[in-house]
Amino acid sequence: MMATVNYQEGLLKRLQDPEYASEYLNEALKEGSQEMFMLALRDVAKAKGISQAAKEANLNRETMYRMLSEKGNPNLSSLNKLLDTLGLTLTIGRKESAA
């Protein structure tokens, strides 16, 4: 019998790679839902360890949990601190036109 890896464990392991995490978050953004993006961001923070990420970003752990909730609405400076801690950055690109 083959051993299986729990999906969540496998995802969190892959999300430790900043390249994979970047693609994961960008796909969540494409969905157009703030809730979807916040859930994806929470997954990326979990991969690092939310407590560790909060400490490195100089954010309160409880504030971090609230910020990463489905209805979280972080301010830009908090979001940038968290992304920096995760080895990521926020960038703006030109919208692709539908042809």
Image: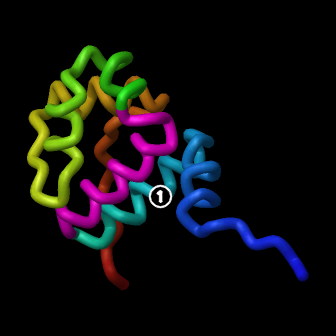
Residue 70 lies, with reference to residue 65, above or below; the image says below
Q: Is 72 on the left-hand or right-hand side of 61?
A: left
Q: Quadrant of residue 25?
A: bottom left
> Pointer 1: what residue?
24
Residue depicted at 9% across the width and 47% down the height: 73
Q: Amino acid at mark 1?
A: Tyr
Q: Specify the quadrant that holds the C terminus.
A: bottom left
Residue depicted at 54% across the width and 62% down the height: 8
Residue depicted at 20% across the width and 68% down the height: 33
Residue depicted at 47% across the width and 58% down the height: 24
Q: Which residues are magenta?
A: 33-50
Q: Is 45 on the left-hand or right-hand side of 34?
A: right
Q: How many marks?
A: 1
Instruction: Assign a secondary structure to mark 1.
Output: helix
- Is residue 13 on the magenta stretch? no
In depth, the one of 29 and 6 nearer the eye is 6
Q: Dot 1: within a 10 Å radius of its alpha carbon, few (fewer than 14), some, or many (20 or more) residues?
A: some
